[in-house]
Amino acid sequence: MALMGPNGAGKSTTLKAISGVIKLERGEVTRGSILFENRHIANKSPEEAAKLGILHVLEGRRVFEEMTVEEHLRLAARTARRFGKSPEPELVFRYFPRLKDLLGRRAGYLSGGEQQMLVIGMALMIRPRVMLLDEPSLGLSPKAVYDLFQILKDINRNEGITLLLAEQNVAVSLEIAHYGYIMESGHIVLDGPASSLKENPDVKEFYLGLKGGYRDVKYWKRKKRYL
């Protein structure tokens, strides 16, 4: 699943509400509901959500800069055991073999792409059922973004882990997602299968930068059809 839209649309807040991180920021869900397997989980703590199998990879590649890659993975393994799960480091190295060569390096000295591998690898170690990824492409080169999203696609297909991406990069999100939502100003304004969204005139014009010809030079003044 891809939750897409401009900066400030509410994508990160939606993920934080699902994972319970919003409680740590003194926020709460006041309307609507969040259901996971027919269970209401709104306003649960992040630990309670994690025990259910919902893991949140936060925006900005949150690592402990002075800790090594190995120490990060050991921390994730300890968390997995705390939740009654058996950590699988080989699963992490299967998708991110680069981390095996970086075990002794401090996280603060990793590149942006390597840090992203590490935080996703930590989540994989805990074997989530649902992984929430907030702006995983942020600050990465186009090549690193492409490689990362192909790995995410493989994780979804091979491990059966549901992925919910919150992304401003609509083009790359629609390449791997099965279904997508466009969010603006806190509201879902458009949704559908990714294949359909890629052909939607508004998505093409306002999010993919595509436009048919020059018949209307001031096309940017046109209002979006879904608003």
Image (cartoon, grey):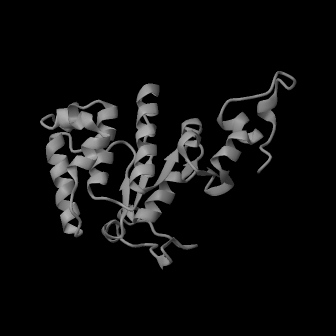
As drawn, which residue projects farthest toward the right?
Answer: 215
Q: Residue at the spot x=70%, y=46% of the render?
A: 196
Taking depth in this image into account, of 135 and 89 the one nearest to the observer is 89
In the displayed structure, 159 sits above or below 118; it is below
- What is the residue that sits farthest to the front in this orientation? 158
Say which quarter of the image contains residue 50. bottom left
Asked if residue 127 is positioned above or below residue 104 in the image, the reply reads below
Residue furthest to the bottom in view is 39
In the image as oriented, which residue stretches furthest toward the top?
Answer: 214
Residue depicted at 48% across the width and 77% down the height: 40
Report the front residue among 97 and 31: 97
Left or right: 123 with respect to 190? left
The answer to whether any part of residue 67 appears in the image is no
Q: Residue at x 44, y 51 (%)?
A: 156
206 shown above or below 37? above
Badge count: 0
**Residue at 29% over, 30% down:** 111
Q: Position of residue 190 (x, y in %)?
A: 69, 52
Residue 106 in the image: state x and y as whole percent. Answer: 16, 36
Query: Which of these two is toward me, 61 or 105?
Result: 105
Residue 170 visible somewhere in the drawing: yes
With 221 as the anchor, is 149 left or right in this view?
left
- Side of 153 relative to 218 (left or right): left
Residue 127 drawn at (x, y percent): 31, 59
Q: Percent x, y for residue 224?
A: 77, 44
Quadrant hosting residue 27: bottom left
